[in-house]
Image (tube, rainbow, N blue to C red):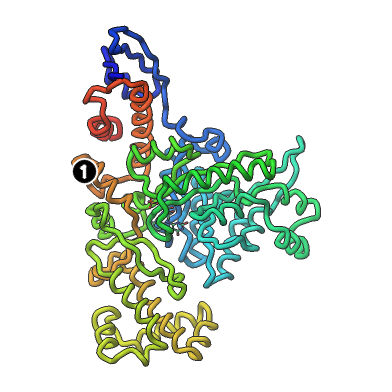
Amino acid sequence: MKPSTLDNVVLEQFLNVTVPLQVTVTGSDAVTRTLEIPPLPPEQLGDQQFCREIGIRYPYIGGSMAKGISSVAMAEELGKAGMLGFFGAAGLPYQTVEAAVAQLAAAGVPYGFNLIHSPQEPDLEAALANLYIEKKVRLVEASAFLALTLPLVRYRTHGIHRSEDGAVVTPNRIIAKVSREELAERFFSPPPDKFLQQLFKEGALTAEQVSLAATIPMAQEITAEADSGGHTDNRPAMALFPTIASLAHRLQKKYAYPVQLRVGLAGGIATPTAAAAAFAMGAAYIMTGSVNQACVESGTSDAVRKMLAATRQADVTMAPAADMFEMGVNVQVLKRGTMFPMRAARLYELYRTYDGIESIPPAEREKLEKSVFQATFTDIWRDTRQFFLTRDPRQVERAEREPKHLMALLFRWYLGQAAHWAKDGAANRTMDYQIWCGPAMGTFNEWTAGSFLEAPEQRRVATVARALLYGAALVTRGNFIRFQNIRLPAAFTIEPLEDRLIKEYLP
Ligand SMILES: Cc1cc2nc3c(=O)[nH]c(=O)nc-3n(C[C@H](O)[C@H](O)[C@H](O)COP(=O)(O)O)c2cc1C
């Protein structure tokens, strides 16, 4: 069947996504019909009930970015714009997170905090969970968990009660970020009984609370995280999302929860078409990361923002992660303009090959000390030792017993510092910048090339978010028309619309 042609359609009407669009079309049989395309304001793209429950207008979340890269300012700006931002608590000292909690609590907007699984620092994970309980942080993004932990269950079940109408009320909400179905299953299931019993023994839960807790999911929402910046399993969104969504459906039935399980999508979303695809798959909300790091509110340096603005799709690669170095875990980072990924990979190779720094061939060691560490191993170990003596003396004891552990701590010094050099914009260390970043960054730069959003100083989180949501609404409306076998005029194809969106709708 030949596509019908549009006899009349007004571009203005098409662009105003809050009004219905009436079009007259003539089919190949010369019969004329009038169609009404419904309005599609961006708030309607995701799960509106979810938005109501957490107090936001748009189904859009800025994901946590470690070391305060997703800053207080970023969460505040997203909150003011009717969206949600998670503060990036990972890798920060307790006092810094405590100060951020106080600032965001006073900001008068919805917000959340990251609770990241810290196998190296279980005490910090527990302390943060307690801080969130004490300061009434009601929304937490739980990430990097390999299994559920006691602090996480403590947070989720704290204050659970029955309301007057008999409903189970859980004041603390967890949005879990996962990229594996086994883990998604744990989060969509009730808290494990062994942890509930332990909390009961400690007096943290009453017997009634234990029985109520057995009827709730650990997390009502899961963000399926596809190939993204930072820690990632590099799963394609197209393959990951349907699996997690199907799991939500199955577990909803299995446990007959009175609340709705929901799935959001993160990873690779930085254009209207990607956002529209996420909503088309049924995402309750979308989450972004890489693109927000490139915005003015992020807690990184202008030097990094500039590098991110020049990033193309293939300029990212996997490199060893500082926090799980010995386990061989990788993170996705920028490779353009920095030698970090290569240098970090070399360190991991040496770690695998040798028993300790004494076994590294002298020429190799000299090269590393000169170009990578820019100091002798002896000096670096002195500082590292000092650091761990206050933070976790057990590490020093172990390193002094096991040369391989000492080598790991030394190498992790470089990986850790590399993130700081980037964040602080250290001019003498640009070649060592560790910048977490996914392919989404390149896709965003391609989309915004030639528009005002090309300049790093114009990139504001809420502007970017509005552009993505509004663009997704346009793409979806365009699809309503296309799927009826109606050919859109050239002026209505996505590219000119996006240009227009950026030039006219957003400033
Ligand atoms: C610089 C950076 C730091 C990140 N740090 C964290 C983190 O500490 N905790 C976390 O849950 N996710 C972290 N992420 C992941 C984001 O929250 C988000 O899920 C992801 O970036 C989305 O994919 P995208 O990068 O393709 O937009 C980080 C991402 C970036 C780019």
Q: Is residue 419 visible?
A: yes
| Above or below, 1 relative to 360 | above
Q: Residue furthest left?
A: 450
Relative side of 14 to 162, left or right: left
Q: Position of residue 144 (x, y in %)?
A: 51, 61
Taking the image as shown, residue 37 lies to the left or right of residue 166, namely left
Q: Report the residue marked by disc 1.
A: 449
Position of residue 203 measured from the top left corner of the image (x, y, whole percent):
77, 62
Image quarter for ligand 1 = bottom left
- Please rate how many residues cluster around mark 1, counting C-alpha atoms within 10 Å: few if below 14, some from 14 to 19, many from 20: few
Please identify the quarter of the rendering in which residue 345 is found. bottom left
**Residue that extends furthest to the right in the rendered view of this protein:** 207
What element does badge 1 sit on? Answer: loop
> Would residue 106 be seen by someone viewing this image from the given angle?
no
**Point 54% across, 48% down: residue:** 222
Check the picture and name the quadrant holding the C terminus: top left
Quarter of the rendering occupied by the N terminus: top left
The image quadrant of residue 232 is bottom left
Asked if residue 75 lies left or right of residue 461, the reply is right
The amino acid pointed to by label 1 is Ala
Q: Nearer the viewer, residue 2 or 344?
A: 2
